[in-house]
Amino acid sequence: MSTEHEEIAVVGAGLAGCLTACFLARRGYRVALYERRPDPRTGRVERGRSINLALSERGLDALRRIGLDEQVMADALPMRGRMIHPVAGEPQFQSYSASGDRAINSISRGALNNALLDAASKLPGVRIAFDHRLVGLAPATGEMTFETPQGKVTETATVVLGADGAGSAVRGQLVGHGLLTESLDFLDYGYKELSIPPLGGDFALDPDALHIWPRGTSMMIALPNPDRSFTCTLFWPTHGTAAFASLGSPAAIERHFAEHYPDLIPLAPDLVDDYQHNPVGVLGTVRSTPWQVYGRVGLLGDAAHAIVPFYGQGANCAFEDVVELDRCLDECADDWAAALPLFQQRRQGNAEAIARMALTNFVEMRDKVASPLFQARKRVEHALERALPGRYVSQYELVSFSTTPYAEVRRRVRRQHRVLGVVVAGAAALVAGAVGAAVRGRRR
Ligand SMILES: Cc1cc2nc3c(=O)[nH]c(=O)nc-3n(C[C@H](O)[C@H](O)[C@H](O)COP(=O)(O)OP(=O)(O)OC[C@H]3O[C@@H](n4cnc5c(N)ncnc54)[C@H](O)[C@@H]3O)c2cc1C
């Protein structure tokens, strides 16, 4: 199929939408990118919604393919490990990789979105319509209705791609037409942003790490920013006595942080103001099926499969979707009716795999990282990786520093654990045998 004159509509000019527009324009399509917000490059960031992302290999791989990796990385700060902050005592550094030199990269979601918007708007064939909120869709014809400051407008496209995030209106329209089923599993945890400004012109904490304050039922993390500040994200239950709403006064907020996060107090002068005025965001897992109907309306990124943020993979996974969609279009000679089902077939299992790993990682981050047993396991894991290069690779390394499909990561890690279990059991049997022989020898 010739791609030259077709117009593809992409709803949502967030991370996945902008990247999709770039990939499709390179294939020769005309692309209309519709975004409900005004142009974010001219506006201000909403309070408490700055969000730093940990960008890792999957996201970088996608950016490399459109030559945007170096520009994006110029604004990123590499984090080579976790810095664990106990309630009392010195923070402890845990390297992410066995070699100690691999890093995930802290980047502002807004800055990344703006870089992608710039890249998309420079490409011939891409038209971006801001202040266009999708409110209606006829899936069979590709007719879309948008609310704009000038009133409702109608547009039509050969193919409509929903890249409009976790609360996707495109997905909602498909559900409304009885063409798609969705499940939304909200966590009973929410998140609130707090800030640590520069201290004496420099970073107040080590900028080479992702900082974690694991507290069992709650957790705080902090990622560095290029202006030498840190953005902290506090994860806490949304309801109950130990929850966001339980801190009703400045004194209660100060008391709580002094008790649970004492080293934060001198570093966060705006703590009370941030706490009182920044919103609580919701977290959850979105599952939907199918991801396409009639071979002409498709979903990708968070619109198809939003996940909780605890593996730092939502955007990385969304970027990987775009690479896979491009690959499917290649393999199907741009026949969308064939490419969209193939895309779903290839990506759905992977999205489910990372959704599960992200949920499991929440327990690891808020609880296990502080335990001596966990730290010993990590040391053994890194030792194994060094001893068996390429044969034993940790789950974290496969997820963050490779493009091994997520579902394959889970299978491979299970296989490695089985082999390790046999080796450990064998070693234990040998040790037990040797001890038994020694005891018998002594008795004789
Ligand atoms: C606290 C937090 C931390 C995170 N940390 C990480 C991390 O470390 N690493 C990582 O990879 N990911 C992380 N994520 C996840 C990441 O932010 C998302 O996975 C990513 O933004 C998904 O991209 P998207 O383009 O699919 O959706 P979005 O980025 O949500 O973009 C959707 C776009 O669609 C627009 N839109 C919505 N509705 C309409 C409509 N009706 N009409 C038109 N436009 C519409 C929106 O305005 C938006 O621009 C984090 C998320 C959170 C909440």
Image (tube, rainbow, N blue to C red):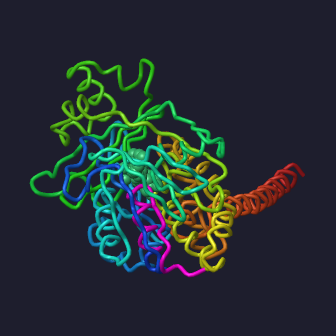
- For residue 152, above or below residue 418: above
Q: Provide residue 192's location: percent of width, then percent of height.
A: 33, 37
Image-based side of 89 in relation to 203, left or right: right
Q: Position of residue 368 (x, y in %)?
A: 52, 43
- Quarter where residue 202 is shown: bottom left
In the image, what residue occupies the spot 76% across and 58% down? 418
User: Can residue 292 be seen in this snapshot?
Assistant: yes
Q: Quadrant of residue 428?
A: bottom right
For this orientation, the residue located farthest to the right is 444
Q: Is residue 61 magenta?
A: no
| Residue 249 image point, x, y percent | 23, 19
Instruction: Name the foreground residue: 257 vs 432.
Output: 257
Image mark count:
0
In the image, what residue occupies the spot 40% across and 24% down? 243
Find the magenta span and give its range.
1-24
Q: Nearer the viewer, residue 209 or 223?
A: 223
Residue 83 visible in this rendered orientation of the protein: no
Spot occupied by residue 124 in the image (x, y as percentages of width and height): 35, 78
Which residue is nearer to you in this view: 309 or 78?
309
Is residue 22 highlighted in magenta?
yes
Write the residue at 90% across / 52% down.
444
Q: Is residue 344 above or below residue 251?
A: below
At 53% from the left and 35% from the top, the residue drawn is 186
